[in-house]
Amino acid sequence: MLNDPLLTGVNGDSALVAVEPVSRSGHPDAMALFIRRDGATLQTVDSFSPFIVLAREDLLQGPLRDATVKVLEGEAPFRWKVSFPTWKACQSAKGWLAKHTGMAAGNPAAPYFLINDPVQQYLMQTGRTLFKGMRFDDLRRMQVDIECYTTEGFDFCNAEREGDRIIAIAMGDQTGWRLVLSGVELDERTLIERFAETVRERDPDVIEGHNIFNFDLPYLMTRAARVGVRLALGRDGSAPSVRPSRFSAGERTLAYSRFDVFGRHIVDTFFLAQVYDISQRSLDGYGLKEVARHFGLAQPDRVYIEGGAISAEFRKDPAKVMRYAGQDVAETEALSRLLSQSAFVQAQMIPFAYQNIGLRGNATKIDALMLREYLRQGMAWPYPDKARPFSGGYTDMFISGVVKNVQHVDVRSLYPSLMLSRRIGPGSDGLGVFPRMLDQLRRFRLEARALARQAPAEGERLHHDAIQMTFKVLINSFYGYLGFDQARFSDFDAAERVASEGRQLLHAMIDWLREHGARPVEIDTDGIYFVPPDSETGAAQATFRQAFEASLPKGIEVEFDDAYVAMFSYKMKNYALLTADGGIVIKGAALKSRGLEPFQRRFLREMVRIKLEGRDEDLPALKAQFEKAIRQHEWPVGQLAKTETLQEAPATYAAKIARKSRARSAAYELALKSGRDYRAGDQLAYYVAGTKKSISVHAGAKAVAEWNPVEPDENVAYYVAKLDALYAKFCGGQLGEEGAD
């Protein structure tokens, strides 16, 4: 299916599993290619000439004077492609251009353009992509999880702390192989040595872990340095390189430690879960146990140990900790199998290293596809369009409260359909690459959906389903590309026109539903929740749907994809749905905020079910049950606690407090009072003690480790007040049955 050079590049060579820049005799700057042949991974070397593209001919001076220049065709500004013999020479030219023009390379207005990733440059110029001709199961994927011992008196482990250490390293792969290296049998130095040896022996293409970037790999690197072990994980025997980076998933941006292992890719399922949740908004949290339970991946005999109890459990029953670690890697493998197949398919198309597929945005990916085709055809390209604000998609809520018998109609790829049917695209795309790619992706997606439905085996069905979902995500990102100010072919007028025509169409659909006896509940960009007319059953339902589809303009298709027993509509993009089989789907941060204490999240989930099932008379009893548990200290303190990560050293925090440049924080205050060596990256779990309902959290906070179940001192008045506020917010009468329009 994936055989269109426009989407996959012109080089059809198969089974390329990794590309790495190298410097060696005879190849001052080259690319090492790792290729799978007959089960073995072979390494070859290919030449590489990095390049910069200029928008002004007068910049061909200084370190660019003696470089190789090719003039691209067309009248667009970026016409001078300048090639260099080495990456170092290319970087030197970039530095000179930044100084000479006064503009950094990432500035959209800069008169020069550089892709600051040698692997991406190489893939774009050669038309190669990873994994051509491979299935997901052809990848060698190793999962890794470590468990650590924490010095008594601290809540969480810290690799820099003398008394902390690694007590287990669990590994697994997609074949079902598992190995747990135990700290009972091996000292820490031997644990780390055996781990590195095992990685090199089994030679995975991908190393996977849950929060592997910000926990497992940093901890391994730090402890390896402390015990004098070189963490040689690369295919060339090198240790990982590391640098600070940032990851964005929707409105969330996380700082993380970017690790690169020569010849291998790192995949963090913690990040994959967040990318998944951008569109689904259904995860209660991103921890491995929470996500595994959500997807039904947890094993029946799953061992659960609270993070703060690992050390005590290791002292008491180390075998239990080893089982726990082994089950962690099993869940990580299952989670990756579920969530990373889309990235695998994208890597067959997009000129990125596999590791970068999950870390870069979709608009950046589309830009890479556009530029690859322009390079292939030797055509110049434009400056990005100047950014400006414009009105976006149409979202609205018409009914609040609980609504029975709700259906959902999905407008299939609304914006892409409008762009294709009304020929809306970047005005600067002289080659017409944008609409051709969009049309091909949509056609291939339909083919993949059909193949998934017809597939006789589960593995084949999952493969084709991953393809069609990948295409869906990319297709729906073409509109966002038009309004992305870093995109080479951005066009804010075109983006505004698409959004405007989308709003007009959705308004017309809402009007049609109302005119024909339906009641809209909520609309979210390209989907409508509505209550059908009272007579809509059997044949009448089919007639109603056919009439609705017939009312739509040519090129616009809809799908009546779900029906729900009830919907709790709280506010825009925050709602809950009751499925026919009794399942609950909750979307939106207001109904499952991760900033709430665990007992509040539990209350919200149970409250939502009661409301959806029409049992509002049971709400006072639910509140009374939770209040009784608080007043009589029935719960472990973890139900009332919050956990925070120190983003800076406590001493830095103290200096800011002294300058009155920040507010006080419970976690930092506890770290300072403890007298222990807390550092940036450490986590503290705390609860609020005392008797007064109104209290500053930082003043009443106590470390969870200080809590005594024999003499519990949690602040009953404070936590009951939080429960009262939550109850009043959601159950105070303002959101009853069939709320007002």
Image (tube, grey):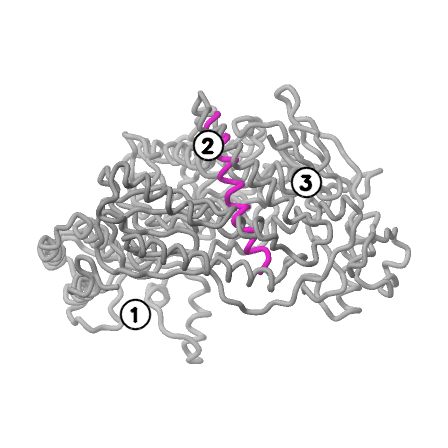
Q: Name the residue type under label 1.
A: His
For badge 2, the amino acid type reads: Met
Which residue occupies the extreme bottom position in the image?
Answer: 659
Instruction: Magenta stretch: give its range.
Output: 460-483
Residue corresponding to mark 3: 6
Mark 1 vs mark 2: which is more N-terminal?
A: 2
Is residue 723 something one can see in this rendering? yes
- The picture places residue 22, in percent across and down from the top left corner, at 74, 41
The residue to which callout 1 is attached is 698
- Is 651 on the left or on the right of 136, as rendered? left
Residue position marked by numbered label 2 in the rendering: 171
The C terminus - image quarter: bottom left
Q: Quadrant of the N terminus?
A: top right
Query: Main SS of the magenta segment?
Result: helix
Cα–Cα gap, marks 3 and 2: 39 Å
Q: Position of residue 535 (x, y in %)?
A: 23, 45
Mark 2 element type:
strand
Label 3 or label 1, whichever lies nearer to me, is 3
